Amino acid sequence: MGLFKRNPFGHIYFIKKWLIRIFGAITHKRYRGFNDLHIEGSEIIKNLPETNVLFISNHQTYFADVVAMFHVFNASLSGRQDNIKNIGYLWQPKMNIYYVAAKETMRTGLLPRIMAYAGAITVERTWREKGKDVTEKKEVNPNDTENIKIALEDGWVITFPQGTTKSFKPVRKGTAHIIKQHRPIVVPIVIDGFRRSFDKKGLRLKKKGILQSFIIKSPLVIDYDNDTIEEIVEKVEFAIEQHPSFLKVIPAALIKEQEELNQMRKWDY
């Protein structure tokens, strides 16, 4: 109890709280200052239960997406309506927010290792290794799924079900299995503008004056007993606007812009 009280993963709350405060203060201008973060749906955050909530989102950078979510969630819980004005909301942050991240990503340097202490649930990707797809999928580590279960029982979990920052990649079935097994409230989030603002890792500011968007949608309607894994996967793809059908309605100009961004990202490695 007290100063050295720990969460279920052994992390000391006092240290975690100060990490969130410090990194939040350092990164705030990235979303309100150098760039602007347009938020919709913050009222949904305020009405969620304390535990067993799974946030699903498309993915554009390794770290900037998650940091933005910490800002938006805490600002919403502190009464901000679709904004992150006045970082006083970080003084008493929600301590049971976790995010799923690739183990190899969180071991790439000192900064990612420090950030992992703020709430990362590191998992071994079965389909990708050292930045490349593998032909033979590795077996799922049972400790990874158990850690996600523990995190859901303790609080909120953020996951990026495509497992990559590339657009319109298939949603991994592992997310659907988690949903079906643990029956969380599933809240979709759709983000945009982050890959134009930051490098691929989301640590270096690449361009200023970008309008970033952060749309929180109503929880998914899921029949945990009768929906198949494939049906849940499709619901997730539609909810985070990454279903292949969305490609048919994207204007040609946006497709060209995406191709240019993909070319630019080659320099981020």
Image (spheres, rainbow, N blue to C red):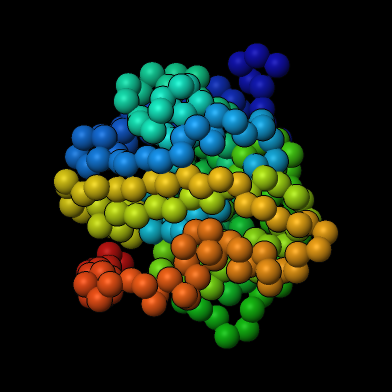
Is 23 drawn above or below residue 143 in the view shown? Answer: above
Please give the count of numbered marks on the rendered protein.
Answer: 0
Kindly tell me whether residue 105 is visible in this rendering: no
Viewer-proximal residue, 142 or 45?
A: 45
Residue under the image location 46 percent in, 62 percent down: 241
Q: Position of residue 80 (x, y in %)?
A: 41, 25
Residue under the image location 33 percent in, 71 percent down: 250
Q: Residue furthest top?
A: 2
Is 236 drawn above or below residue 187 in the view shown? Answer: below
Q: Position of residue 213 (x, y in %)?
A: 34, 48
Q: Residue furthest bottom?
A: 135
Which quadrant: the C terminus? Answer: bottom left
Which quadrant: the N terminus? Answer: top right
1 with respect to 31 (left or right):
right
Viewer-proximal residue, 66 or 126?
A: 66
Q: Position of residue 182 (x, y in %)?
A: 76, 51
Q: Residue furthest front?
A: 249
82 with respect to 45 (left or right):
left
152 with respect to 207 (left or right):
right
Kindly tell me whether residue 142 is visible in this rendering: yes
Viewer-proximal residue, 170 or 139?
A: 170
Residue under the image location 61 percent in, 69 percent down: 234
Q: Position of residue 145 (x, y in %)?
A: 72, 56
Residue under the image location 39 percent in, 75 percent down: 247
